Image (cartoon, rainbow, N blue to C red):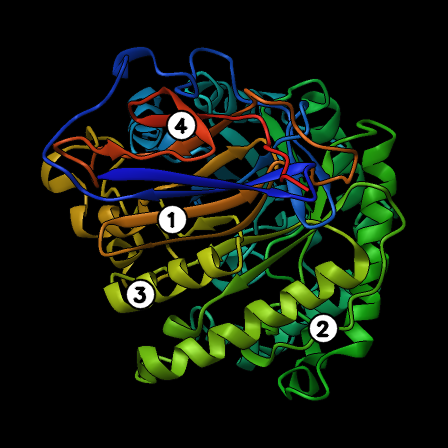
Amino acid sequence: MGIGTRARTAAAVAALAAITLAASALFTAQNAASAPGTAGVGTAPALGHTGLWLTDAAGRVVVLHGLNEVFKVPPYAPAASGFSDDDAAFLQRNGFNAVRVGVIWAAVEPAPGAYDDGYLASIEQTVRTLAAHGIVSLLDFHQDLYNEKFQGEGAPAWAVQDGGLLDPALGFPYNYFGNLAEDHAWDQFWRNSPAPDGVGLQEHYAAAWAHVAHRFADDASVFGYELINEPWPGTLWEPCALPLIGCPLNDGQLTALYQRVTTAIRAADPTKIVWIEPNTLFSTVDTTHVGTVRDANVGWAFHDYCGTQAEGLGSTLCASIDGLTVGAAKSYASAHHVPWLLTEFGATNDAANLSELVDLADKNMLSWLEWAYTGNDKTSASPDGQALVLDPNQPPTGSNVLTSKLKLLAEPYPQSVSGTPTSWSFSGGVFTLTYSTARADGAGGFAAGALTDIAAPAVQYPNGYLVQVTGGTVAAAGSVLQIASSPARRRSP
């Protein structure tokens, strides 16, 4: 594989570089074992943002590619599923730099106002294990179908108020649409109905989040908090399924929840990005009425599941539908001047669907976290069909890894850019990146010699790769290719 970089001058201020990679039988690594950008212990970077971009402390644009790791059964901790250091090393080795780590409200607050710090210690150990391999974590308060009573997970049993209504066991996702007891429980949550101790359900939720944020406030490897996974509108869901109408009533309630939780978190952690989501039906109707959360560090997280929600449509039609979903997500992020992140897609072994979405993300220069790393999802009819690694209790090698899926996901991409990307793509073994050395925040440009790191996973380049650079030089090559920018050249009058 080869990487080429072309550079030219933009108003004699910022260089525009282009990088191309293609498979080769040659290996040009200068020090593959210790190439800069191959993180060591405790080197996961602290992340901020500017506009749609995530950035590191030096102002470099950071791009995330990673997986979800959510354990949906007691004790709800990834470590209990078998996720450990060999899994983190596998992720790093294949170029992934982020994981969405599931945190379950029922485990955080098993009784009203009582928190299980032993559970959070397990989550913290997983975060540290990932950080030791240069991988950042997004903490995700995960739920499906609200609670185990409705064949899901998320809220503690004491937070379930079902009204004694009809409770058929329709499974995931059908309980959302046909289980009156579950919809009633969601309605009570949106109304902030009193818990058994007289405190509102949302107030408990916000306080639980604040407790988690207090523990992780000083952990730079946690880049944010995703406030709730796939919130459901309750009995308001029917109009939410209409593309041009969406869910204005519940989205107003959702905005208020996000403001409540964000305010509570800020008392514990003033800086980490809080990531908010549209309601569950967003990736079906591409419409949202979620408003502005008044905070300087908000991010927009969304999911895209055409291929699994509408099986049989085929990749061609899904490509159009996925384009609408990504476009709607970008519109919200742009309008609110917040970063965006695709925190779930995939949940399938359909190579065409996965490839189409990864290419779409590349086209939009969008960071992503695919669902899922392991196959233990009780809300799936085919858990192994969602996995990259089938059993985290076993080493991530051989038949325990879906290698065809790995090769689709473990693609080259710019992990950090000393400047602002303008495009990247990967097709037929060829990776191309263009970027300006202008800072994403508009505060000038990066100096000559500033470094850009590009993931170059060995699964794509078993025989190594060639590097071709214009407007820069190869600083190091290996599992991470590092390019140092050259001085911008002034044009002659």
On-image quarter of the N terminus: top left
Find residue 402 and report its horizontal and vertical position in percent.
18, 47
Contact check, label 1 and label 2, Cβ < 8 Å: no
Observer able to see residue 62: yes
Q: Nearer the viewer, mark 4 or mark 2?
A: 2
Residue at the spot of label 3:
381
Residue at the spot of label 1:
432
Residue 460 appears in which quarter of the rendering?
top left
Estimate the spatial distance between the alpha carbons at disc 3 and disc 4, rounded to whole Å: 23 Å
Label 1, residues with CA under 10 Å away: few <14, some 14-19, many ≥20:
many
Q: Which mark is residue 79?
A: 4
Between disc 2 and disc 3, whose residue precedes? Answer: 2
How many numbered marks are there?
4
Find residue 121 and report its horizontal and vertical position in percent.
56, 20
Find residue 155 and report its horizontal and vertical position in percent.
63, 50
Q: Is residue 203 left or right of residue 359?
A: right
For image coordinates 12% across by 32% down, the residue present is 463
For image coordinates 71% across by 59% down, the residue present is 333
Between disc 3 and disc 4, whose residue precedes? Answer: 4
Q: Which mark is residue 288?
A: 2
Q: Nearer the viewer, mark 3 or mark 1?
A: 1
Question: Which amino acid type is marked by label 4?
Answer: Ala
Estimate the spatial distance between the alpha carbons at disc 2 and disc 3, rounded to whole Å: 28 Å
Question: What element does badge 3 sit on?
Answer: loop
Question: What element does badge 1 sit on?
Answer: strand
Find residue 157 and report its horizontal and vertical position in percent.
62, 50
Q: Nearer the viewer, mark 1 or mark 2?
A: 1
Estimate the spatial distance between the alpha carbons at disc 3 and disc 1, rounded to whole Å: 38 Å
Contact check, label 3 and label 1, Cβ < 8 Å: no
Question: Which amino acid type is marked by label 1?
Answer: Thr
Q: Nearer the viewer, mark 2 or mark 3?
A: 2
Residue 145 appears in which quarter of the rendering?
bottom right
